Amino acid sequence: MHYTAIDFEKSMRALVDEGGLSAHYLLPELNDPSYPEDELKVIQLVDEHDRAWHAGQAFGKAVKI
């Protein structure tokens, strides 16, 4: 998991866009106005069998679990 001090929308860009950071999971913050769902969900960004590069590109795609 990776903590960001930015909202959900910016966190997704930072953790998913090519050349950004990566993490296996993202946990949205309660009451974040940029979070599009009504209920909080843990978002898997990188499969647990794959490596997430803290300082670089992730291999995988975002999956809500």
Image (cartoon, rainbow, N blue to C red):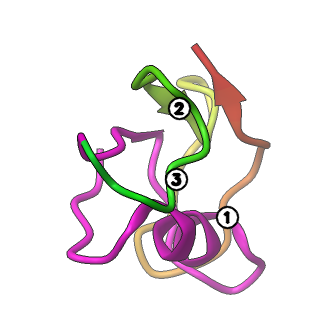
Closer mark to the observer between disc 2 and disc 3: 2
- In this rendering, the answer to whether 25 lies above or below 13 is above
Is residue 8 left or right of 30 when viewed as pictured?
A: right
Q: What whole-number distance in Å separates the C-alpha atoms at marks 3 and 1?
A: 11 Å
Q: Mark 1 falls on what kind of element?
A: helix
Q: What whole-number distance in Å separates the C-alpha atoms at marks 2 and 3?
A: 14 Å
The answer to whether marks 3 and 1 mark residues whose Cβ atoms lie closer than 8 Å is no
Quarter of the N terminus within the rendering:
top left
Name the residue type under label 2. Ile
Q: Can you tell which quarter of the image residue 14 is in?
A: bottom right
> For the residue carrying disc 3, how many other residues have a C-alpha within 10 Å: few (<14), some (14-19), or many (20+)?
many
Q: Earlier in the sequence, mark 1 or mark 2?
A: 1
Magenta residues (range): 1-30
Instruction: State the residue in front, 19 or 31.
Output: 31
Instruction: Return the residue at label 1.
Output: 16
Determine the main secondary structure of the stretch shown in magenta.
Answer: loop
Is residue 7 left or right of 48 when viewed as pictured?
A: left
- In this rendering, the answer to whether 2 lies above or below 36 is below
- In this rendering, the answer to whether 10 lies above or below 3 is below
Q: Earlier in the sequence, mark 3 or mark 1?
A: 1
Q: Can you tell which quarter of the image residue 56 is in?
A: bottom right
Residue drawn at point x = 50 percent, y = 26 percent = 38
Name the residue type under label 3. Ala
Instruction: State the residue in front, 27 or 47.
Output: 27
Q: Which mark is residue 43?
A: 2
Instruction: Return the residue at label 3.
Output: 52
Is residue 7 left or right of 46 when viewed as pictured?
A: left
Name the residue type under label 1. Val
Magenta includes 60? no
Residue 9 location, x and y as percent?
Answer: 56, 67
